[in-house]
Image (cartoon, rainbow, N blue to C red):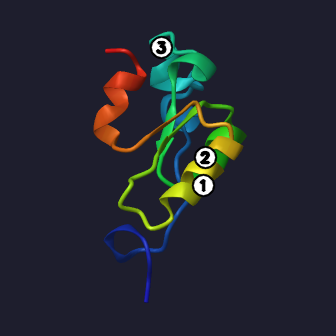
């Protein structure tokens, strides 16, 4: 069985520099003046999400639903990973950002 588009073998994927002839300067976020450590947040509901955010040097906001049987453990894990904020419901994010 062959894999790839149109049944052919997979080939090399084009890179941004090979597609346009030049390398992008940071992508769309950079074009808008976004500073990753202050304007972007990683939002997730697992400790792995928190660890990924830390590895990316991006502030983490944890979503810990009270209905989760491991709610208390999750809150403590988020705190241990240095979460910027922990909310019970994603719909409360506007309160985190002061909107």
Above or below for 14 versus 60:
below
Q: If you read the primary sequence from the N terminus, does the residue marked by circle 1 or circle 3 appear first?
A: 3
Badge 2: few (under 14), some or many (20 or more) residues near its Cα, within 10 Å? many
Q: Which residue is mark 2?
A: 78
Measuring 56% from the left and 49% from the top, which residue is drawn there?
75
Above or below for 29 versus 9:
above
The quarter of the rendered structure image containing the C terminus is top left
Residue 40 locus on image (x, y percent): 51, 25
| Mark 1 and mark 3 residues within 8 Å of each other at the beta carbon | no
Q: Nearer the viewer, residue 54 or 10?
A: 54
Badge 1: few (under 14), some or many (20 or more) residues near its Cα, within 10 Å? some
Q: Nearer the viewer, residue 35 or 63?
A: 63
Decide if residue 80 is on the left or right side of residue 69: right
Distance from disc 1 to disc 3, alpha carbons, whole Å, reads 31 Å
Numbered circles on residues, count: 3
Measuring 55% from the left and 28% from the top, which residue is drawn there?
21
> Please, what secondary structure does the residue beneath circle 3 have?
helix
Q: If you read the primary sequence from the N terminus, does the residue marked by circle 1 or circle 2 appear first?
A: 1
| Mark 1 and mark 2 residues within 8 Å of each other at the beta carbon | yes
Q: If you read the primary sequence from the N terminus, does the residue marked by circle 3 or circle 2 appear first?
A: 3
Point out the frontmost of discs 1 and 2.
2
Above or below for 21 versus 5:
above
Residue 47, labelled with which disc? 1
Q: Which residue is mark 3?
A: 31
């Amino acid at each position: 069985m062959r894999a790839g588009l149109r049944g052919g073998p997979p080939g090399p994927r084009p890179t941004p520099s090979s597609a346009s002839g030049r390398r992008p300067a940071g992508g769309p976020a950079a074009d808008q003046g976004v500073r990753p450590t202050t304007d972007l947040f990683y939002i997730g509901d697992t400790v792995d999400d928190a660890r990924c955010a830390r590895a990316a040097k991006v502030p983490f906001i944890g979503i810990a639903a009270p209905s989760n049987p491991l709610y208390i453990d999750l809150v403590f894990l988020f705190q241990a990973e240095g979460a910027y904020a922990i909310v019970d419901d994603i719909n409360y994010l506007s309160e985190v950002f002061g909107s």
